[in-house]
């Protein structure tokens, strides 16, 4: 996912239909349509034009991680880059992405607790 710290809106930088965040639909794979639907739904549901670059990084990592939970073919290291006029392309550190993923998981667990009323056991 590409981000710009000048607050260029996500939909202007990466239109949802061809963003690269959500993979294109492959008509030969039925699960491809489902994964694209999950990705698009989460992006549309959670994206806000007022989001900061940091919030967009969290959203990108969350959407990719959640999509990966639904299909074993989706996965591997998540890579995120910040693109600015001043610095150009700067890929964010893997340790930062890992921390974002950990914080997303904590938020996800709080949501589970809200709906379930208890802490989910880790397997």
Image: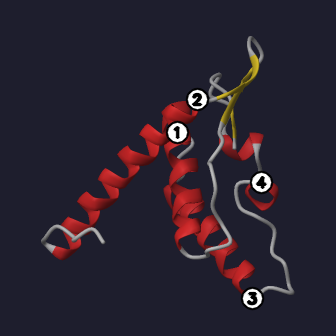
- Quote the CA–CA distance across marks 4 and 3: 19 Å
The answer to which image quadrant residue 13 occupies is top right
Q: Are marks 1 and 2 in contact (CB under 8 Å)?
A: yes
Of all residues, the one furthest to the top in this rendering is 86
Q: Earlier in the sequence, mark 4 or mark 3?
A: 4
Q: Secondary structure at mark 3?
A: helix
Q: Which mark is residue 97?
A: 1
Residue identifier under label 3: 30
Q: Position of residue 64 (x, y in %)?
A: 59, 58
Q: Position of residue 51 (x, y in %)?
A: 51, 38
- Quote the CA–CA distance across marks 1 and 4: 18 Å
Q: Earlier in the sequence, mark 1 or mark 4?
A: 4
Relative to residue 47, is residue 53 depicted above or below? above
Q: Position of residue 34 (x, y in %)?
A: 66, 81
Residue identifier under label 2: 93
- Say left or right for 45 vs 73: left
Front-most of residues 93 and 89: 93
Relative to residue 28, is residue 46 depicted above or below? above
Q: Which mark is residue 20?
A: 4
Residue displayed at 30% across by 72% down: 123
Q: Are marks 4 and 3 in contact (CB under 8 Å)?
A: no
- Say left or right for 113 vs 40: left
């Amino acid at each position: 996912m590409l981000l710009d710290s000048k607050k260029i809106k996500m939909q202007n930088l990466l239109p949802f239909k061809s963003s690269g965040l959500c993979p294109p639909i492959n008509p030969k794979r039925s699960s491809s349509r489902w994964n694209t639907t999950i990705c698009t739904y989460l992006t549309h549901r959670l994206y806000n034009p007022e989001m900061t670059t940091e919030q967009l990084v969290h959203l990108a990592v969350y959407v990719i991680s959640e999509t990966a939970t639904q299909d074993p073919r989706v996965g591997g290291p998540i890579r995120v880059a910040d693109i600015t006029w001043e610095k150009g392309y700067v890929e964010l550190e893997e340790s930062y992405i890992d921390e974002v993923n950990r914080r997303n998981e904590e938020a996800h667990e709080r949501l589970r607790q809200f709906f379930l009323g208890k802490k989910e056991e880790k397997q």
